[in-house]
Image: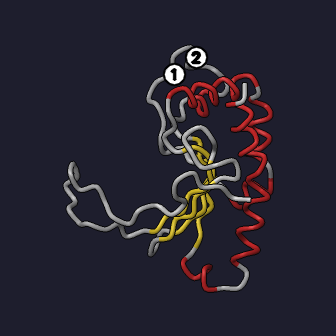
Amino acid sequence: MIHCQKKCLLRIYRDIRFSPNKEPYKKNYGIAFDVKGYGPTTPSYYLHLEPGNCFFGAGFWMPESRVVKGIREEIDYSGEEFLEIINDKAYKSIFALSKEDTLKKAPKGYEIDHPMIDYLKLKSFISVYPLKEEDFYREDIVNKLKNAFITIQPFILFLRKALSQ
């Protein structure tokens, strides 16, 4: 069962107060949810629909510092398990770990030569499955997304474990 504490469907209007772009509406439609209740301390699933930029994502996007610290500690302690998950053949055939949001230097408490430094420097922990707009007009989209949910489950469980300690 999927839970949404407030809303799963993200707003379509933009906060234009501090943005140079004064267009009032977003060009995308987003849906964020999790089986444990969508919120800042649970990894979530996200479906992004936008012309030319559709994707399914899972994990933590820009989590609070306490969450980042817990995930980094779990990667440090269970690095082999983390690598098994993100290097799994099924995972790699669908998802890619986003490395767009990273620190320039090693995070506090970790050396720059740490074997997992590339993952410890991440500020967001997201797996992304790019989709084409046309995919949503095909009957097999349900099976594609179902397969993606099954495949991403070990990644989600790893993130949940990191926060349960």
Residue 156, position as x, y percentages in the image: 71, 45
Residue 141, position as x, y percentages in the image: 69, 77
Q: Is mark 2 on a helix, strand or loop?
A: loop
Does residue 100 appear left or right of residue 155 in this picture?
left
Tell me the number on the disc at residue 17.
none
Tell me the number on the disc at residue 110.
2
How far apart marks 2 and 1 lie (CA) works out to: 6 Å
Dot 1 alpha-carbon crowd within 10 angstroms: few under 14, some 14 to 19, many 20 or more: some
Q: In this view, does 7 lie above or below 76?
A: below
Farthest residue in the front direction? Answer: 6
Under mark 2, the amino acid is Tyr
Quadrant for the N terminus in the image? bottom right
Residue under the point 22% across and 52% down: 19
Quadrant for the C terminus in the image? top right
Dot 2 alpha-carbon crowd within 10 angstroms: few under 14, some 14 to 19, many 20 or more: some
Q: Quadrant of residue 155?
A: top right
Q: Mark 1 points at which residue?
A: 107
Q: Is residue 54 above or below residue 133?
A: above
Residue under the point 59% across and 41% down: 125
Q: Is mark 1 on a helix, strand or loop?
A: loop
Q: In this view, does 139 lie above or below 141?
A: below
Under mark 1, the amino acid is Pro
Residue 41, position as x, y percentages in the image: 59, 37
Residue under the point 50% across and 70% down: 49
Check if mark 2's residue and mark 1's residue have beta carbons within 8 Å: yes
User: How many numbered callouts?
Assistant: 2
Does residue 78 appear left or right of residue 102 in this picture?
right
Residue under the point 74% across and 33% down: 161
Q: Which of 16 and 52 is in front in this view?
A: 16
Residue 75, position as x, y percentages in the image: 69, 29
Does residue 59 appear left or right of residue 100 in this picture?
right
Q: Which colour scheme is used?
A: secondary structure
